[in-house]
Amino acid sequence: MAFADGRFEGGGCFFRCALGKGGVKPAADKREGDGASPAGAWPVRRIYFRPDKGPPPVTGLPLISLQPEDGWSDDPAETRYNQLVALPCPGSHERLWREDGLYDLIVELGYNDDPVVAGKGSAIFLHIARPGYLPTEGCVALAEADLREVLRALDGRSVIEIRS
């Protein structure tokens, strides 16, 4: 569980985490671009990793090796909104192959994906934290070593709960 006060708990482990710069909002109030982390319990879908930045994580989840042309649509007008896209793509998107290291490991959370509702928020991930645990754009972020430890415990039945 990730708490708005910067705690991440699970399986007897406690870590510091960063959440959205817009705070934690009920999922019903979440909107694209608001910077908020959506409160709720979100299933973990799959893990994306940079193969050039270290070994794949040890986990019970499906692993996908990122490629330089990978992106994530955050454009509510696009048909592939809140999905992995190949770049270049016509709409607004996030580049997943980043130079800052934040997306060297990404856990895709099952927020707004079943079904996808345009404008309700996209790209809600568990990923590597910035130095100093600066706020995210709505994701949950952990130090890389802590994230790798969490990944060892995750499988297809796991959920990440975000609480205020």
Image: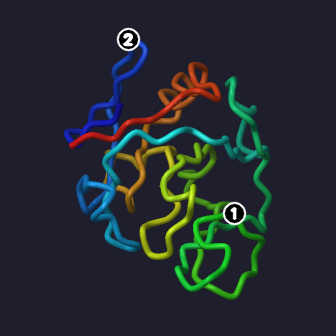
Please determine whether, in this image, residue 91 is positioned above or below residue 127. below
Residue at the outermost front position: 115
Q: What's the residue type where badge 2 is placed?
A: Gly
Choose between 108 and 49: the one closer to the eye: 108
Instruction: Measuring from the top left, give residue 128's x and y in whole percent.
Output: 50, 44
Please determine whether, in this image, residue 118 is positioned above or below residue 62. below
Instruction: Measuring from the top left, give residue 83's x and y in whole percent.
Output: 65, 64
Dot 2, how many residues are within 10 Å of its Cα: few (below 14), some (14-19), or many (20+)?
Answer: few
Residue at figure coordinates x 28%, y 32% from the top left: 7
According to the image, label 1 marks what residue? 84
Residue at figure coordinates x 52%, y 60% from the top left: 123
Measured Cα–Cα span from mark 1 to mark 2: 33 Å
Please tell me which of labels 1 and 2 falls first in the chain: 2
Q: Is residue 6 left or right of residue 146?
A: left
Q: What element does badge 2 sit on?
A: loop
| Number of dots carrying numbers | 2
Q: Quadrant of the N terminus?
A: top left
Residue at figure coordinates x 63%, y 67% from the top left: 72
Q: Say the numbered circle drawn on residue 12.
A: 2
